[in-house]
């Protein structure tokens, strides 16, 4: 009497592999996205602390009672502001304030809602550098530590902004988009660093579907700049 060996047919094996492949194609990209978002959120939290420590060290080492007494308070003088502030950063590359030099990806960055933001690598006179972990940092001076970022014209953001710092925590890698891997902070004259989108910031809100990108009394949720505060508050990217 002949014995039959039980097993899978070739068709059954192929169908099983096909099912595994379909499931993998659906699950793996989502897992990769979640992992990347978690890494980015961790860096945003990290740089809130790094920037605050850098400003406080700068203020203390130079015995400034207020940053209005420092080179960070100037009439849009990015050169002196950047040359002073960068002394507190661990840079692996300093691109200064000249156009180019590849401290940011040489591409057109996008806003959160997908519209064009601009090429950070080619912004004139803005201080730029690369940090130790490969993140790109930019420094833009404001007017005599008196620029207003308050919707209500009161509180910590009222007539007290010295500079704007933006960081691409993903370095040269995509997506090169505000609110996805580019985030912003304010340096205030009292030495505090506030994330963009916090308090009553004119750039509050974080909505990829919004067409509102101009700072104002209703914020600018489509720009992505207000996402910095949202990530810090939630500890993750949820949008």
Image (cartoon, grey):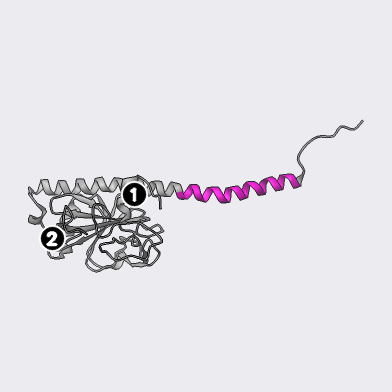
Q: How many marks?
A: 2
Quadrant that contains the N terminus: top right
Residue 148 position in % (x across, y down): 17, 61
| 40 w.r.t. 2: above or below | below
At a point 9% along the width and 56% down the height, the residue shown is 68
Residue 2, image quadrant: top right
Classed neighbour count for the residue bearing mark 1: other residues with Cα under 10 Å, few (<14), some (14–19), many (≥20): many
Q: Which residue is mark 1?
A: 231
Q: Position of residue 117 (x, y in %)?
A: 34, 66
Question: Residue, x 19% and y 48% (percent of image)?
Answer: 54
Horizontal side, residue 126 vs residue 182: left or right: left
**Label for residue 174?**
none
Residue reaching furthest to the top? 1
Helix, strand or loop for the magenta stretch, by majority: helix
In percent of width and height, residue 165 lies at: 24, 57
Query: Could you tell me which secondary element the residue under label 1 belongs to?
Result: helix
Instruction: Give the x, y percent position of residue 69.
Output: 7, 55
Query: Which portion, as a residue range, is magenta?
Result: 11-33
**Outermost residue, right side:** 1
Instruction: Count neighbours of disc 2 (C-alpha within 10 A) and say few if under 14, some if 14 to 19, many if 20 or more.
Output: many
Viewer-side residue, 3 vs 215: 215
Q: Left or right: where does residue 130 sit relative to residue 80?
A: right
Q: Nearer the viewer, residue 151 or 48?
A: 151
Q: Is residue 10 magenta?
A: no
Kindly report the distance in space between the C-alpha atoms of the residues bearing marks 2 and 1: 27 Å
Residue under label 2: 146
Task: Judge whether 127 appears above or below 28 on screen.
Answer: below
Mark 2–mark 1 contact, CB under 8 Å? Answer: no
Report if residue 29 lies within the magenta region. yes
């Amino acid at each position: 009497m002949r014995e039959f060996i039980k097993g899978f047919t070739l068709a059954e094996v192929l169908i099983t592999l096909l099912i595994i492949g379909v499931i993998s194609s659906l699950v793996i990209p989502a897992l990769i996205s979640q992992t990347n978002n978690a890494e980015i959120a961790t860096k945003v939290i990290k740089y809130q602390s790094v920037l605050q420590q850098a400003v406080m060290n700068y203020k203390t080492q130079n015995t400034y009672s207020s940053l209005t007494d420092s080179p960070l308070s100037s009439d849009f003088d990015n050169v002196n502001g950047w040359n002073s502030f960068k002394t507190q950063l661990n840079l692996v590359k300093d691109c200064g304030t000249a156009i180019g030099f590849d401290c940011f990806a040489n591409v057109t960055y996008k806003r959160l809602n997908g519209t064009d933001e601009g090429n950070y690598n080619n912004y004139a006179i803005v201080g730029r550098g690369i940090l130790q972990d490969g993140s790109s940092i930019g420094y833009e001076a404001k007017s005599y530590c008196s620029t207003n970022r308050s919707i209500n014209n009161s509180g910590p953001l009222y007539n007290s902004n010295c500079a704007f710092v933006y960081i691409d925590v993903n370095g040269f890698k995509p997506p090169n988009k505000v609110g996805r891997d580019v985030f912003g902070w304010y340096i205030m004259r009292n030495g505090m660093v506030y994330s963009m989108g916090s308090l009553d910031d004119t750039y509050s809100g974080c909505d990829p579907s919004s067409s509102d990108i101009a700072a104002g009394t209703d914020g600018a949720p489509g720009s992505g700049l207000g996402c910095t505060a949202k990530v810090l508050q939630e500890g993750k990217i949820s949008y």
